[in-house]
Image (spheres, rainbow, N blue to C red):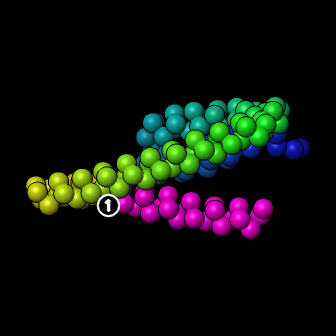
Amino acid sequence: MKVKNRRGFIVAVIASMLCCASIVIYCILKEQRFLISSFLLITIAIFNFYNAFSKKGIVEELQDNADERDLYLTMKTSHILVKIMNYTLCAFTFLFLIAYSAWKNQSLLVIAITLCVIEIFLFVAYLLINILLDKKE
């Protein structure tokens, strides 16, 4: 069998792993919410496995029908969005650091560190993807 919808397949695999984790937690803690969540997750996994092997996903359909202008606009939009996200994350990181220095509230420092980690992750991911695409093309 060939995977026709990669996104659906990935979602199905993640839902299956979460379902297994939920069942293990249910066996340990014996709480009903974990049993209910595992039933919901297995339903999502079955539905996405069915879609992954039966019909093409939206991303695959768009790749078949996209022309150069659409690809250029998508690339330009993604680049602008990455710039906006970087500036926003940087601004909010410094804002929360300044707020922490003013009020000495530990939760403000935790938020600032979290935003900084997200910004570093985006930078590293952007760099690695750029290197990978540079070698591939």
Look at mark 1 in the image and give the residue it sits on: 113
Q: Residue at x 51, y 33 (%)?
A: 36
Count the labels in the image.
1
Dominant secondary structure (helix, strand or loop) of the stretch shown in magenta? helix
Q: Please tell me how crowded label 1 is: few (under 14), some (14-19), or many (20+) other residues with Cα within 10 Å.
A: some
Secondary structure beneath dot 1 equals: helix
Percent coordinates x, y for residue 65 in the rendering: 81, 33
User: As displayed, is residue 4 above or below residue 131?
Assistant: above
Quadrant of image for the C terminus: bottom right
Percent coordinates x, y for residue 122 in the rendering: 50, 58
Q: Is residue 30 visible?
A: yes
Magenta-highlighted residues: 115-137
Percent coordinates x, y for residue 111 in the rendering: 29, 54
Q: For the view shown, which residue lies furthest in the right direction?
A: 1
Q: Residue at x 10, y 55 (%)?
A: 103
Whether the magenta-drawn stretch holds residue 131 is answered as: yes
Position of 64 compared to 127: left or right?
right
Of 131 and 22, the residue lying toward us: 131
User: As displayed, is residue 136 above or below residue 16?
Assistant: below
